[in-house]
Amino acid sequence: EDQVTQSPEALRLQEGESSSLNCSYTVSGLRGLFWYRQDPGKGPEFLFTLYSAGEEKEKERLKATLTKKESFLHITAPKPEDSATYLCAVHSEGRRALTFGSGTRLQVQP
Amino acid sequence: DAGVIQSPRHEVTEMGQEVTLRCKPISGHNSLFWYRQTMMRGLELLIYFNNNVPIDDSGMPEDRFSAKMPNASFSTLKIQPSEPRDSAVYFCASNHRGTYNEQFFGPGTRLTVL
């Protein structure tokens, strides 16, 4: 059974204080790892897809990396508007559906 | 593009009543997903359609839940009879090529069953 664990559950940063969110996974053959951002009262919004170990993708202050066991979402010099819940999901050979982690709630204080 | 449209945005009903949630996917997308999100269980896939055909319904909790996609621009998720434990936010998402690609989520329907 595919498993996705995100840590920490919650993270509070000061504006400009860089940090990383972790997504550990156990799957039977990874086909893709997805990062989504979810604002309160809204649906998840796609950020990145990573397909193989060593791959990296960047978007503004966010950078996602992937190893064979985990993915990191690095946030550089965050701003208050980066406050949201960040969800990690995996697509594996064993399942047609995505398996989502429980998310990391990020709060960036000015 | 208007994005994925869901209705109603909020639904409050009493236990035992029938509930129907509606979704209009993004025009041109051929895959549609229904998810449920709760604090306890997070985001879970209920059912996934490709070209209007159900591909994976293994996440549908029980026979009280049913989903249809009569055409490429409309889908429904029905709960009959509803129970308090069905209270959750239900999301619809759509995309091209199913699970391999990014999914575009709607704003969700918050369901409360009293």
Image (cartoon, rainbow, N blue to C red):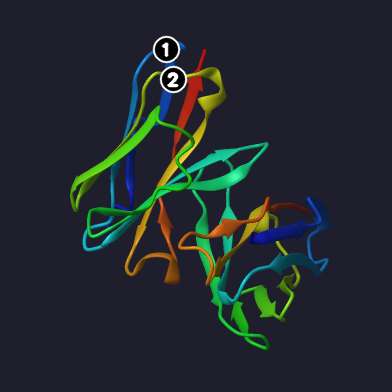
Q: Chain of mark 1?
A: B
Q: Secondary structure at mark 2?
A: loop
The amino acid on which the numbered mark 2 sits, given as a three-letter code, is: Ser
Say which of A81 and A35 sits in front: A35
Pick out the residue farthest to the left: B71
Q: Mark 1 falls on what kind of element?
A: loop
Residue at screen point 63% across, 86% down:
A55
Q: Give the camera-side residue of B17 and A42.
A: B17
How packed is label 1: few (under 14 Cα within 10 Å), some, or many (20 or more)? some
The residue sitting at 74% across, 58% down in the picture is A6
Residue in the picture at 27% in, 62% down = B29
Badge 2 sits on which subunit?
B
Q: Residue at the spot x=36%, y=22% of the render?
A: B80
- Residue that badge 1 annotates: B16
Query: CB of mark 1 within 8 Å of CB of mark 2?
Result: yes
Between discs 1 and 2, the one toward the N terminus = 1
> Is A32 placed above or below A87 here?
below
Q: Which mark is residue A5?
A: none
Q: Quadrant of residue A14?
A: bottom right
| In the image: residue A71, left or right of residue B19 | right
- In percent of width and height, residue B66 lies at 34, 35
The residue type indicated by label 1 comes to Gly
Residue B101 can be seen, yes or no: no
Query: x and y percent of residue B49 in the render?
Result: 31, 54
Which residue is denoted by mark 2 in the rendering? Answer: B82
Residue placed most toward the observer, A79 or B9 = B9
Q: Is residue B104 visible?
A: yes
